[in-house]
Image: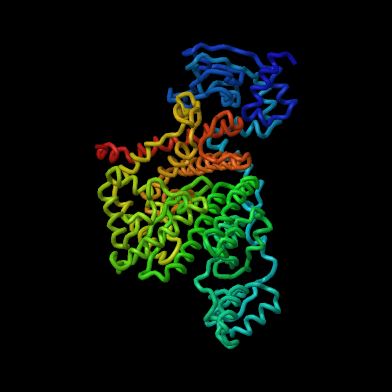
Amino acid sequence: MQAELIDIRNHLAQHAPFDEMAEEMLDKVVSSIEISYFRAGTPILEFGQRNNWLFYVRSGAVEVYRRSGELYSRMSEGEFFGQFGLLMHNTVRFPATAIEDCLIYRIPDTVFKYLWDNDENFADFADTEGRSRLRSALSRREKSNELMTSKVTRLISRKPVAAPCTVRLQEAARIMTDQGVSALLLMDEEDDRPKLKGIITDRDLRTRAVTEALPSETPISEIMSGNLITTRAQSFIFEAMLTMLHNNVHHLPVMDDDEVRGVIALSDIVKYESQSSLFLVSNIYHQQNIKDLKKVSRDVRDSFVRMVNEDANSHMIGSAMAGIGRSFTQRLLELGEEKLGPPPVPYCFMALGSMARDEQLVVTDQDNAMILDDSFDPKEHDAYFLALAKFVSDGLDACGYTYCTGDIMATNEKWRQPLKVWKSYFIDWIDNPKAEALLNSNIFFDLDGIYGRTEFAEELKTLVAEKASNSQRFLAMLARNALNRTPPLGFFRTFVMEEDGKQNKTFNLKRRGTAPLSDLIRVHALACGSRAQNSFNRLKAIAETKLIPEDGVGNLRDALEFISIVRIRHQALAIEAGREPDNNVRPEDLSPFERSHLKDAFQVVSNAQKFLKFRYHSQVGRHAG
């Protein structure tokens, strides 16, 4: 092959969909190519003209328009256009003009149609826009992970073993031994149709019965676990895993409406989940001091990397990492109470930010706060809660969750207040949305009660959901604030780099990617009165209320997933290479596949920000001052 053709081939092979094309097909494309040059401002295709070529941009930039003259898309290096006309009797449907000097590879329609008929990946790529390409790319990943495609019913190997909740302790133990099970379901049989009332496990028998030397005739209802955490028969295995992580339970009854289909155990999921984040969580609760917790924390990054290498999705990874972070926090609170004694008044420890949203990764600091009972007296009680907050904060820092540089921690007196004060904070931020209030809203409106009287946190969630949805002024200002961070995509669909400091020639996938998405999703979720915290769950709520078009929700979901996965893989690769992980990416370190689809995802973010501005336009303009 001539040197010029080798150069053409190498360039095509760096860009989707040619990067996955069979060798003989790629050779056929390369040997057919003709090269053209178009000066800036020159029309390349005009509406209605006959065209027999697919146009591939080697260098330069092209604008493609709709028939009305409205801009449809901008194309840059490695992208192609003209395919829709080739599929419509070789008649141009979308006119195109060079907006920079362009070097164009022209591929004949005969070759295009050959690829269309014989290469499914090429046909899918050519037939779709950015969002559909993202969906296609994500679907391939999802299909490779059994956790994400298999239902929990696959783990059920036998009918559930159950007994009346009136059974005595000795009889319950005998049933479990005879049936060879580690968990016994307890049913309320007063009605014609028995209902699940509770569960007892081997661990419960050891810790609640044997250790306490309870009589054999003790009613099992006295030590059973009620208010059960369950999963649906339609759930995927990864959803059951996240439920176990979030709630620190080892057995999950599987429900089909009100009927119990079976019980799945931690050991069942570990068969699929070889990175053992569930075992890591279990191990955390067995540690007796901060020194031992610090040793266990070394396994967190290994767990993260294994999940990435097993093609877990971002929701699974973010939730698993958040579950691990919660477990460290909860164990530190238990140890703190053992050291300091019981709390003088009830309290709730809140996680904020990415941990509350179940979107935590390995590059993270600690954001937390305390809600105290309204009977709290600072003079009598605050010394205890300050000492507890400091114990937890120091312990988290030792375990790799660094101190918050913005001092958003329970060690700060401002964020260690009674419930009534927290309610006054939230009401004031919504009623008076000044700059500081908006910043606090972005931080504190992602909250999760993880220890103690968690109903305190639930009251705050309800307050926010009800009050924010009825305050158009607050939503308008929050929307305006959400437009401050823009995706790193330039006018010609090129990446915009940081130009100073040690991160020169990189872009930050959190600050310029996932954070802008989280911000705008939060605005829409608050507008529709959702209490959800996770961005994917917020999108479900937005879709249900039809606040934005269905396609718009799908676009946001796919963009969030793809940007998150690229960010996650970037961090995992750094860990495997022995480097400190971060969020700053150099384009040359991305694969052609990632570069191409990141541009699609960033375009979705840009379009969503434009929609946000349009959706709240009148309020944004009215309250901009």
Percent of width and height locating residue 413: 32, 56
Residue 465 in view: yes
Residue 193 in view: no
Percent of width and height locating residue 603: 48, 33
Query: Residue at 45% across / 63% down in the picture?
Result: 451
Tell me the quadrant of the picture where the C terminus can be found: top left
From the viewer's perspective, tell me whether residue 98 is left or right of residue 262: left
Q: Nearer the viewer, residue 36 or 88?
A: 36
Count of marks overlaid on the render:
0
Percent of width and height locating residue 564: 53, 42
Q: Which quarter of the picture shows residue 380?
A: bottom left
Q: Which color scheme is applied?
A: rainbow
From the viewer's perspective, tell me whether residue 208 is left or right of residue 620: right
**Above-or-below relation of 547 to 38:** below
**Above-or-below relation of 392 to 585:** below
Q: Nearer the viewer, residue 370 or 419?
A: 370
Tell me the quadrant of the picture where the N terminus can be found: top right
**Above-or-below relation of 179 to 321:** below
Q: Nearer the viewer, residue 18 or 585?
A: 585
Query: Residue at 34% across / 45% down in the picture?
Result: 439
From the viewer's perspective, tell me whether residue 236 is left or right of residue 342: right
Percent of width and height locating residue 242: 56, 57
